[in-house]
Each structure stands twice: as structure tokens, then as C-alpha cells.
Amino acid sequence: MSDLTTVVHGANELVVGPGDDPLETYGDGALAVVDGEVAAVGPTADVLREYPAENAAEAIDASGRAVVPGFVDPHTHALFAGDRSDEFAAKLRGKSYQDILAEGGGILRTVRAVREADAETLLANLLGHLDTMLANGTTTVEVKSGYGLDTETELRMLDVIEQADRRHPVDVVPTFMGAHAIPQGRDGDDYTDEVVAEQIPAVESQGIAEFCDVFCEEGVFTVEQSRRVLRAGEEAGMTPKVHAEELAHVGGTQLAAELEAASADHLLYATDDDIDALVEAGVTPVLLPGTAFGLGAEYADAEAFLDAGAPVAVATDFNPNCHAHSMGFAMSLSCVEMGMTPADALVAGTRNAALALDRTAGLGTLSAGAPADFAVLDAPTHVHVPYQYGTNVVDTVCKAGETVVEGGDSNVCVTDARSTDMQRGGHHE
């Protein structure tokens, strides 16, 4: 028998998702949740007529507030150990990302810390980060491996990612990224051989990773090395993703288009031809303004992607070099630094972000039949998400229609996810 879990009513603004204006919204809006999915959305009077609030297990009065889809963060490196705050200070003194990496810092430093950490420490770290993300409205997040750079540690990271997905309200999407950096003392071709011949078969046998990503970049993996890794990943059942054109233009975007990857990410140095190639191939561009902010670099040209008709997505790129959990902050930068409207930014952090994870059955929207993942803001409209930069305007978060955060940061994770295996049955779709 279907159960009416939650009714939200009286919202000053209820955002369903992309629309002609450019968002589909309702004033004095309501939604009803049945069996974890949106059963109805529309004007409060219409929804309550069919789904009376008194019949619901929970009723949320959203008067004066906005309700938006839960944020989808399609690009993070949220599983790590160690601390690199001193590198932030070094960058402020003029050291570049490449300088720090050449000295054995950056990714390679985190690799050493992750190799030394046990699984329990890694899991506790990741669950803590997921708590913060959830309190900021993120209900689905992609998490990459890539701080192992050897078979044993990469598998351990993926196992921890899967454990976190089972134990935490946030849906965690696992990506294998053994080709994140070239280990110290190794040749690029030789290490690529290891990723292709040893790591990917082991990851396939483990059966956790959904995507295979590669850092196609100057001084890291060449286009040809990246192609080898991603083709091997495809043969092992993993969908390609590409870190492309972050520090220089080397051709990673065209590779993503060639392989019809789920997404091409960063894209600070993408050209008009690159953009056209992604649109034609149906590859979602994922822009990461927090990374440009942290590097003091130029931002990706969001307007060029939007003008070309690309479904632009935005992500945090949360990692030790970009220590930002908040999709709201990413949306603020998208508006202030990349020229996106608040509506553009919201779609980029919800529906389009879901497309970058191959989630096409309504995730990132509040349309009928979509997963009932949403946030109630302590603000009257969605514009306040980017407008109040530096402030978390999320008050309540519901996952599959059940409240998992109340009162913003004051009461994170109402569900005790750490002591209870949620057994959600995997991701939507």
C-alpha cells in the first residue's frame, strides 16, 4: 500500500525545475510525497485537496519560504586524509599548483596520507564531509577515488565510498580515478599501463565504480594516455568522465566528445570548437568555479556554453585544494564570476548536475515521479541561494521525502546515519 510520507504546503516559491520562464515555479506551492517520490506538485489548494496534510506522516508549513530540489554535486574528491592548509598559504605567496605538485605536494601529498590511513579513518572523514554537504542542501554527490594511485588503495577508497553510500542519507555516486596523477618516480606511459592492465580489471571485479575519470592535463596524462584509460574503463563497464582544459588547452574536451563521455569537467581553456563538439556529442559540461577561485585563475566561460545550448552543470570540486563543501557557494561564484543568472545556477546545480551523472529520471527536479529530494530555504526565493554568499540559507532537507536536516547547521542529520545501515537499495535509476 502506498504511504503519504510528507506534504509541504504554503511555499512562497516552489521550484519544480527548468521551465520556459526559465524555471517552472509555483507561488503558494505545495508538493506531496508518496513512497519516496513526488506524487503531486502545484498550488497548495490543489495539492491539499488530493493529499490532505493531516493524512501525512509529516507536514511542513513552508509559508514565506522557498522550496527547491536537493542540490546534486557532480564532481568532488571528498574522500581524503591529511591537511594541506599550508599549501593554501604557499599559493598566496605566489607558488603555483604545478610548483607545489613538482615538490611532491598537492595530489601526491594527499596520496601519501590516504595510503597511511585505515579504512575506518577514511570513512569517518567522508561521513563528516557528507554531513556538511547535506546541511548545505546537497542530496546527491559524486565522489572519486584517485588518492591511492595503486590497486590496493584505489580499491580501498571505492569500498569506503560504497560504505558511505549505504550509511549516509546523501546518495554517493562512485567514480574510479586511478589516473589522477603520475606517482613520483614513475613514467607516464608505464603508469598508464598499470592503470589499464592492473587497476581497471581489479575495479571491474570489485563492481563498485560507475564512472572512470582521468586528469587529461599538461604534465599529467596526455590525450592518448587518457584515451587508453577511458577505453579500458568503458570495456570494464564504467562510463567515461574527463578532467579537461583546467590548466592549459591540451585536447581533453575533444576526447570527451569523441568518447561521448558523461561529462567534461573544468573547461577553463575550452574553445568555441570544443563547446560545439560537446553539444553535438551530448556531453554535459561541468564548471567548477571554486577551483578557479582557489587558484586565482580565470573562470570558465559559462555564457559561451549557455549560448551554444549546452546543459551547463556546476559542482564544488570539493578536495584538499578546493576546500568548499557548499553548492550555494559554487552557485554564487557562477553568478558573480561567470555571468550566470540565479535561475541558470540553480538548474546547473540540480537537473543539469544530475545529467552529468547520467541521472535522467527526474533527479534534480521536483516533477511528478522524481525522487523527493528537496530543501526548504530560510529565504523567500531561490535567488537567495547565490545572493547570500557565505551564508547557508538551507533550513530543512528531505531525502526521499523524509526529513534528514532541520534548522540548518544547528541539527545536522536528524537520521543517525552512522549507526544505522540505511539499505536504500542503491541510487535512483
Image (spheres, rainbow, N blue to C red):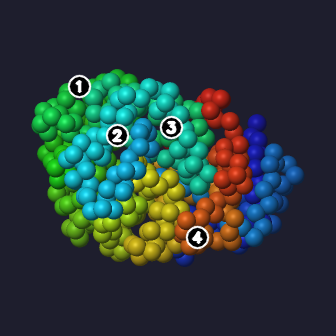
Amino acid identity at mark 3 = Asn
Where in the figure is residue 264, as x and y percent of width and height? 31, 55
Vertical arrangement, residue 62 with respect to residue 162, above or below: below
> Which circle, 1 or 3, is nearer the viewer?
3
| Residue 230 can be seen in this image | no
User: Label 1, on which residue?
Assistant: 198
Where in the figure is residue 79, as x and y percent of width and height? 43, 39
Which residue is at 72% across, 55% downward?
Answer: 407
Label 3 vs 2, first from the N-terminus: 2
Label 1 vs 3, first from the N-terminus: 3
User: Label 4, on which residue?
Assistant: 388
User: Label 2, on which residue?
Assistant: 110
Amino acid identity at mark 2 = Thr
Label 4 vs 2, first from the N-terminus: 2
Q: CA distance from mark 2 to mark 1?
A: 22 Å
Amino acid identity at mark 4 = Gln
Query: Dot 3: within a 10 Å radius of its alpha carbon, few (fewer than 14), some, or many (20 or more) residues?
Result: some
Q: CA distance from mark 4 to mark 1?
A: 47 Å
Secondary structure beneath dot 4 equals loop
Amino acid identity at mark 1 = Glu
User: Label 3, on which residue?
Assistant: 125
Vertical arrangement, residue 143 with respect to residue 381, above or below: above
Label 2 vs 1, first from the N-terminus: 2
Placement of the N terminus among the 4 image quadrants: top right
Vertical arrangement, residue 129 with respect to residue 348, above or below: above
Where in the figure is residue 151, as x and y percent of width and height? 29, 26
Secondary structure beneath dot 1 equals helix
Which residue is at 41% across, 61% downward?
Answer: 290
Tag 1 and tag 3, C-beta contact below 8 Å:
no
Relative to residue 375, is residue 285 drawn left or right?
left
